Amino acid sequence: MWKNQKRKDLELKSFFKQQARASFTVEAAFIVPITVIICALLLLCCFTLHNKIWYTGAAAESALIGNSTQTEKNVSSADAAKKRADERIAAQSMPGEKPASEVNVTENASTVSFGDTATVTVTAVKPAEVMRKLWATSLLLKG
């Protein structure tokens, strides 16, 4: 009688072990793909954020060049900014769509945009006007 009971207990234990292994297999069949999808989405978000930061920096750099008055001979500020923006687009090493650059340089500001990805506007600083305002303010304070 005891032998039969021990055999039944062993059979039950082995049965539950097999059930436990099978449930782990089923759980893994759901958990592993979900984990892989989440990792892929996080990686995609990182690539997207990297590209946005890259193009924002490139737009800011190009806009500063557009505002500078020290450009090469026979090259306008707008052309210099456009050239720098195109160079930065070519230097982008991440895969994906490379947007076209748009440059708008006026007397007061320059705007560089890369499609919907990044747009930067830099207002021109006129040193003579700033110095005059500072001088006038110092005279008022001395007063």
Image (cartoon, rainbow, N blue to C red):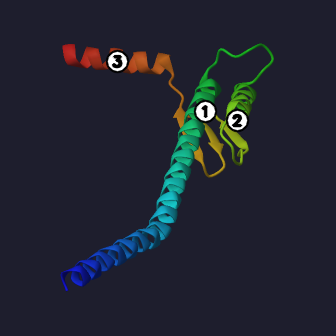
Q: Position of residue 37 (x, y in %)?
A: 52, 61
Q: Can residue 143 be seen in this view?
A: no
For discs 1 and 3, the disc positioned in front in the rendered view: 1
User: Judging from the image, what secondary structure is the residue with disc 1 in?
Assistant: helix
Residue 58: which disc? 1
According to the image, label 2 marks what residue?
Answer: 89
Circle 3 crowding by C-alpha within 10 Å: few under 14, some 14–19, many from 20: few
Q: What residue type is labelled 1?
A: Ala
Q: In this view, does 29 lie to the left or right of 63?
A: left
Q: In this view, does 6 lie above or below 21?
A: below
Q: Distance between the residues labelled 2 and 3?
A: 40 Å
According to the image, label 3 marks what residue?
Answer: 134
Closer to the chain start, of discs 2 and 1, is: 1
Question: Given contact means CB atoms under 8 Å apart, are the residues at marks 2 and 1 in contact?
Answer: yes
For discs 2 and 3, the disc positioned in front in the rendered view: 2
Q: Which image quadrant is residue 130 in?
A: top left
